[in-house]
Image (cartoon, rainbow, N blue to C red):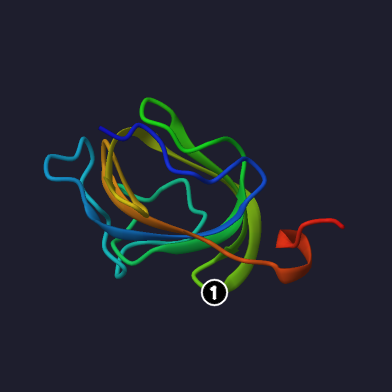
Amino acid sequence: MRVSLPYPSGSLVHVTKFSASEDPITESGTWEQWVPGSPNNAGSLPVGYELRGVLMRPIRIGRCLEIYRTHRNGVSADGNFRSTPIIGIVADTMVETFNSIYQITKVNVPFLDEEEP
């Protein structure tokens, strides 16, 4: 059983809420009701929510997904993102938290990903 994904801290990642967990603690919000950044939103993030940012710690079961967000749904929006704790690794690029299933992909930055000579 896998307990982590191979993305080190500092990786630039793109995260999409793929679906709600099978039995979420908090139901997903809807796009009609969701206001990005509002503390008054009911429920967890809507399915389809996307963010891009820097991974603050390795992705591992028992930890929250923590990202310094640079973009939210394609719009520049600096801030911190923190999920509920990860309860499973669903696939090579997917994790399940108490509320959500997220697809996570590393964003390659050519000049940062090259080995030094």
**Structural crowding at the residue carrying mark 1, measured as other residues with C-alpha within 10 Å and reported as few (<14), some (14–19) or many (≥20):** few
- Dot 1 amino acid type: Gly
Q: Quadrant of residue 69?
A: bottom right
Query: Is 115 located above or below residue 87 in the figure?
Result: below
Q: Nearer the viewer, residue 105 or 45?
A: 105
Q: Which residue is mark 1?
A: 74
User: What kind of element bears circle 1?
Assistant: loop
How far from the left and from the top, in percent, is residue 41? 37, 51
Q: Residue at 58% of width from left, 64% of height from top?
A: 107
Q: Residue at 31% of width from left, 48% of height from top?
A: 42
Q: Is residue 105 left or right of residue 21?
A: right
Query: Is 81 located above or below residue 115 in the figure?
Result: above
Q: Quadrant of residue 17?
A: bottom left
**How many numbered marks appear?**
1
User: Residue lying furthest right in this view?
Assistant: 117
Quadrant containing the C terminus in the rendered view? bottom right
Q: Is residue 6 left or right of residue 97?
A: right
Q: Nearer the viewer, residue 117 or 36?
A: 117
How far from the left and from the top, in percent, is residue 116? 84, 56
Q: Nearer the viewer, residue 105 or 43?
A: 105
